[in-house]
Amino acid sequence: MMESKLNFNEASSQFELEVDGQTAFVEYFTEGQKIYLTHTEVPEDLRGNGIGTKLIKQTLQYIKKHHWVLVPQCAFVSAYVNDHPEWHSILSEGYQM
């Protein structure tokens, strides 16, 4: 399985990870300094390989580096952040897990 680097696709409002010619993505929108992660999708034949987790981890690293405040609206993102307390510092007020 070929790994690839995170792509911040502003035109499509999504963070993308291309793997074996297919794209896993997490959709977002921003409001001021807040970034809302709304939906995560991994192509069916890539599921179960940790691609979604890798995508979310790299997306959160990007968000932290760019000083955005995270508002997780996707269940997958919320579960990941809940399981990884190191990301709680970038959560929006009221979203502390």
Image (cartoon, rainbow, N blue to C red):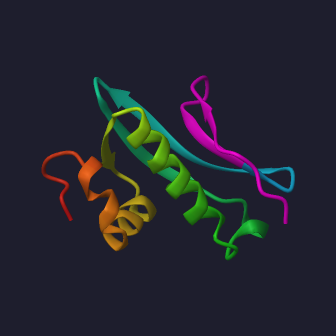
Note whether 21 is above or below 67 in the view shown: below
Whether residue 7 is in magenta: the answer is yes
Q: Residue at x 79, y 68 (%)?
A: 45
Q: Residue at x 42, y 59 (%)?
A: 77
Spot occupied by residue 68 in the image (x, y as percentages of width and height)? 34, 35
Spot occupied by residue 4 in the image (x, y as percentages of width and height)? 75, 50
Q: Which residues are magenta?
A: 1-17
Whether residue 52 is in magenta: the answer is no
Question: In the current view of this chain or complex, which residue is farthest to the left?
Answer: 94
Give the left or right position of residue 21, taking residue 11 as reference. Answer: right
Q: Residue at x 34, y 51 (%)?
A: 72
Quarter occupied by the N terminus:
bottom right
Give the left or right position of residue 20, taking residue 65 as reference. Answer: right
Spot occupied by residue 16 in the image (x, y as percentages of width and height)? 65, 43
Give the left or right position of residue 44, taking residue 63 as reference. Answer: right
Q: Quadrant of residue 84?
A: bottom left
Note whether 11 is above or below 47 in the view shown: above
Q: Quadrant of residue 75?
A: bottom left
